């Protein structure tokens, strides 16, 4: 029975990691219909920023996180201004591929600048595990869980309670009508893209607490981020979070109680079933 | 109007007749070929052979005296997870190029006492880098190195999968390729121009079971084992052999896990292992996944009495660099280790440390050492011709063992590739450093067994 609770806890943790990635993808897709293939690489860049903050300024990744978030927000805005605005004017295919190409550049650029060696941040503030009897709780993984919960809550608050958030939602619903009521849709797009890279910033910083990383780490996570978005509902931020949690729980339960070889198969079957019976995802409209 | 219609119909019927004639012609050619018992591919093969003959006459088989530079292909990963190993290989290649091309007194490495390759009139060597990030890239790059760069042989950081594709180009052009891809399927393929200087999976895996027996006889016995392997060819082949050897040596396999090396978490894998609680875990993993496993073992406060890595990530420089003392107690088979008591090993380890600040590891050295062996092959053959080089490989190389960092008895390649003198060692981490523990005459420390769990360290 102990094992059941441990598996459930680990599933929720893993789901929260997928959710961190999925929310950024869902936001960009929901607002501007662009699939952000570079979201995993944005997260990777954030991990390297946290690493260098730690190496040069001796900052713990949690302390460095606000700085990384701000840097990533402005990085997102630069990417939007330089690449996305132009791609939005082009055919659908170039809109799809532009972030894919950007991802490749970011991976190989990081290899050139930082090298391909696996990196890790060893001097972190919260390390080790707490044995609660029923479950063993890893402090590093708690950082991941809390970051995911806080980012989700802040994103909900921003999108539902603030003017820029409401402007983004209005633009997502109907760009022309939003313009007619005086919303600067260009700024709304730019802010949404900046927020999605900032989310990757928060996720990347938190992930350095647990993961060792190379320039390729984003690629491994990206596919799970996409599946979470599809499961939860295209463009739904809450859906992306729930989609991530579902995946994490299926992953851990299948791997532990059935066979490790089947865990990704189980996720894929669930993905196919949901897309067959609810093509827009669980929370999609 | 009628006139136009008639002309159009005439033109169309002419086209139809021409097309039909072409079709018949093609069919006739095919029939003729089949009648002669040959196919188009056979004709292409003949053409390729003829081209190869022309190439030989054009200079590939030139007498040794006229060769100024001998180019050797060094294939490494330029993207993906093998980038770090690739960077280390390039540094090593730079060191060896300097040693071979210039005179270095008192250095115990091949060609150090001469400038260039003596049997080829002092020809210099040059390593030409090619990419082998994926099997298809490896094929294209091997082809480029041979046809455009005119390399006489190829070495590099090959996996078994990239060896198989690169061998297509090597066999086609008759260029020797030395690879440390350890899969048993490579010698089974009976390639003509393939060679492997160091042991293959079968030797490594058998040695690991011999060691389990050795430790069981001398210390706390091992009865149950768990097998954990990544699910590409590397891991699958090793797991297959481990299952067979487990039966042969009488160990009970209590857990058998195959996982993806791109896994974002291995929590369920470790929880299954913790539940099964084997005496020893045998793992075949790459760098990133071996680190993820170690992280998860620690987080779930679990470590077996003995953890044996089948090389791969466990002997990569990233392993100790990222884990530090957390790497302690992990054992692995290896081809070479920096603490081996031989002068050539110490020399190259020091030169590498001076250049990079990193500890040289066996796998990195093996990949580039094959490039040096390729230089020995060309030198001994006295020719850059593939057939002559293959003959030199089969005859055995005249290499002084005191100049060999791997301290092998020799280099004599069987017809299907393996070096008959290949042998392995067993190492263990202590204080974040890999130390040789077996065989006893090469050991620099006693084994740490049984391993302590994390909370007791």
Image (cartoon, coloured by chain):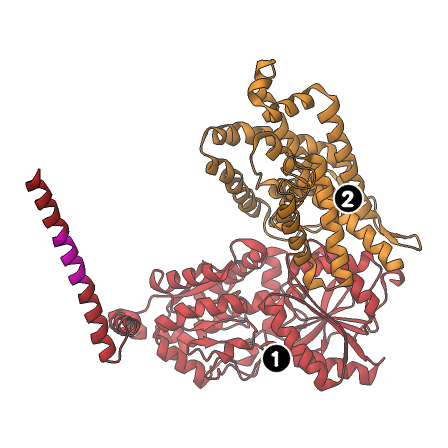
Chain colours: A orange, B red
In percent of width and height, residue B181 lies at: 54, 71
Where disc 1 sits, the SS reads helix
- Along the horizontal axis of the image, is B125 left or right of B455? left
Front residue (pair B158, A167): A167
- Along the horizontal axis of the image, is B251 left or right of B36? right
Q: Residue furthest right?
A: A133
In percent of width and height, residue A159 lies at: 71, 26
| Image vertical order of residue A64 relative to residue A118, above or below | above
Mark 1 nearby-residue class (10 Å; few <14, some 14–19, many ≥20) = some
Q: Residue furthest left?
A: B3
The quarter holding residue B285 reads bottom right
| Image vertical order of residue B155 relative to residue A242, above or below | below
Gap between marks 1 and 2, in whole Å?
42 Å
Tag 1 near tag 2, CB within 8 Å = no
Callout in the foreground (1, 2): 2
Mark 2 nearby-residue class (10 Å; few <14, some 14–19, many ≥20) = many
The quarter holding residue B2 reads top left
Main SS category, magenta section: helix
Residue in the image at 57% along x and 22% along y = A175
Tell me if residue B347 can be seen: no
Disc marking residue A75:
none
In percent of width and height, residue A4 lies at: 85, 57
Front residue (pair B242, B76): B242
Where disc 2 sits, the SS reads helix
* Residue tagged 1: B202
* Residue tagged 2: A144
Q: Which range of residues does the magenta coloring cover?
A: B13-22
- Magenta segment: does it hold B16? yes
- Magenta segment: does it hold A168? no
């Amino acid at each position: 029975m102990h094992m059941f609770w441990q598996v459930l806890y680990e599933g929720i943790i893993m789901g929260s990691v997928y959710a961190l990635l999925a929310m950024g993808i869902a936001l960009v897709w929901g607002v501007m219909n662009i699939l952000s293939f570079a979201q995993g690489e944005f997260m990777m860049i954030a991990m390297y920023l946290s690493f260098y903050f730690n190496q040069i300024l001796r900052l713990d990744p949690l302390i460095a996180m606000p700085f990384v978030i701000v840097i990533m927000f402005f990085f997102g805005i630069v990417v939007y201004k330089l690449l996305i605005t132009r791609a939005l004017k082009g055919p659908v295919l170039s809109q799809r591929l532009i972030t894919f190409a950007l991802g490749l550049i970011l991976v190989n650029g990081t290899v050139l600048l930082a090298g391909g060696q696996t990196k890790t941040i060893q001097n972190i503030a919260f390390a080790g595990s707490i044995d609660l009897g029923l479950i063993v709780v890893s402090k590093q993984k708690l950082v991941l869980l809390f970051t995911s919960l806080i980012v989700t809550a802040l994103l909900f608050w921003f999108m539902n309670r603030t003017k820029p958030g409401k402007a983004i939602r209005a633009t997502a619903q109907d760009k022309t009508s939003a313009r007619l009521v005086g919303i600067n849709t260009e700024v709304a797009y730019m802010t949404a893209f900046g927020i999605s890279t900032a989310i990757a910033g928060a996720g990347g910083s938190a992930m350095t607490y647990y993961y060792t990383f190379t320039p390729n780490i984003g690629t491994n996570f990206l596919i799970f981020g996409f599946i979470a978005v599809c499961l939860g509902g295209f463009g739904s931020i809450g859906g992306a979070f729930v989609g991530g949690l579902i995946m994490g729980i299926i992953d851990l339960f299948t791997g532990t109680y059935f066979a490790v070889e089947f865990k990704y198969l189980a996720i894929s079957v669930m993905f196919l079933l949901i897309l067959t019976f609810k093509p827009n995802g669980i929370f999609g409209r | 109007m009628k006139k136009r219609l008639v002309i159009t119909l005439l033109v169309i019927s002419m086209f139809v007749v021409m097309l039909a004639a072409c079709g018949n012609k093609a069919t006739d050619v095919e029939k003729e070929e089949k009648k002669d018992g040959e196919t188009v591919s056979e004709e292409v093969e003949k053409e390729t052979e003829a081209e190869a003959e022309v190439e030989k006459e054009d200079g590939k088989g030139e007498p040794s005296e006229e060769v100024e530079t001998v180019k050797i292909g060094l294939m490494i990963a330029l993207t993906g997870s093998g980038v770090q190993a690739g960077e280390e290989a390039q540094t090593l290649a730079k060191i060896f190029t300097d040693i071979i091309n210039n005179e270095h007194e008192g250095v115990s490495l091949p060609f150090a006492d001469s400038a260039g390759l003596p049997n080829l009139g002092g020809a210099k060597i040059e390593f030409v880098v090619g990419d082998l990030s994926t099997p298809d890239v490896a094929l294209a790059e091997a082809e480029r190195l041979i046809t455009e760069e005119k390399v006489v042989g190829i070495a590099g950081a090959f996996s078994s999968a990239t060896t198989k594709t690169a061998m297509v180009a090597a066999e086609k052009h008759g260029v020797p390729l030395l690879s440390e891809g350890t899969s048993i399927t490579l010698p089974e393929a009976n390639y003509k121009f393939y060679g492997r200087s160091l042991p293959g999976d079968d030797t490594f895996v058998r040695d690991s079971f011999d060691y389990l027996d050795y430790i069981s006889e001398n210390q706390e016995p091992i009865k149950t084992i768990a097998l954990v392997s990544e699910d590409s060819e590397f891991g699958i082949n090793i797991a297959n052999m481990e299952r067979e050897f487990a039966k042969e040596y009488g160990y009970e396999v209590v857990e058998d896990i195959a996982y993806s090396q791109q896994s974002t978490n291995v929590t369920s894998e470790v929880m299954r292992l913790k539940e099964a609680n084997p005496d020893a875990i045998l793992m075949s993993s790459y760098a990133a996944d071996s680190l993820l496993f170690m992280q998860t073992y620690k987080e779930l406060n679990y470590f077996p009495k003995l953890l044996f890595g089948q090389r791969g990530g466990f002997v990569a420089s990233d392993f100790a660099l990222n884990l530090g003392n957390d790497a302690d107690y992990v054992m692995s088979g290896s081809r070479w280790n920096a603490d081996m008591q031989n002068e050539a090993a110490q020399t190259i380890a020091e030169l590498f440390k001076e250049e990079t600040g990193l500890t040289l590891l066996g796998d990195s050295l093996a990949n580039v050492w094959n490039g040096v062996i390729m230089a020995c092959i060309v030198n001994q053959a006295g020719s850059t011709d593939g057939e002559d080089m293959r003959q030199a490989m089969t005859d055995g190389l005249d290499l002084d063992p005191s100049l060999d960092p791997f301290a092998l008895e020799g280099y004599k390649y069987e017809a299907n590739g393996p070096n008959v003198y290949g042998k392995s060692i067993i190492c263990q981490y202590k204080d974040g450093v890999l130390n040789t523990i077996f065989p006893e005459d090469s050991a620099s420390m006693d084994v740490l067994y049984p391993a302590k769990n994390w909370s007791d360290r």
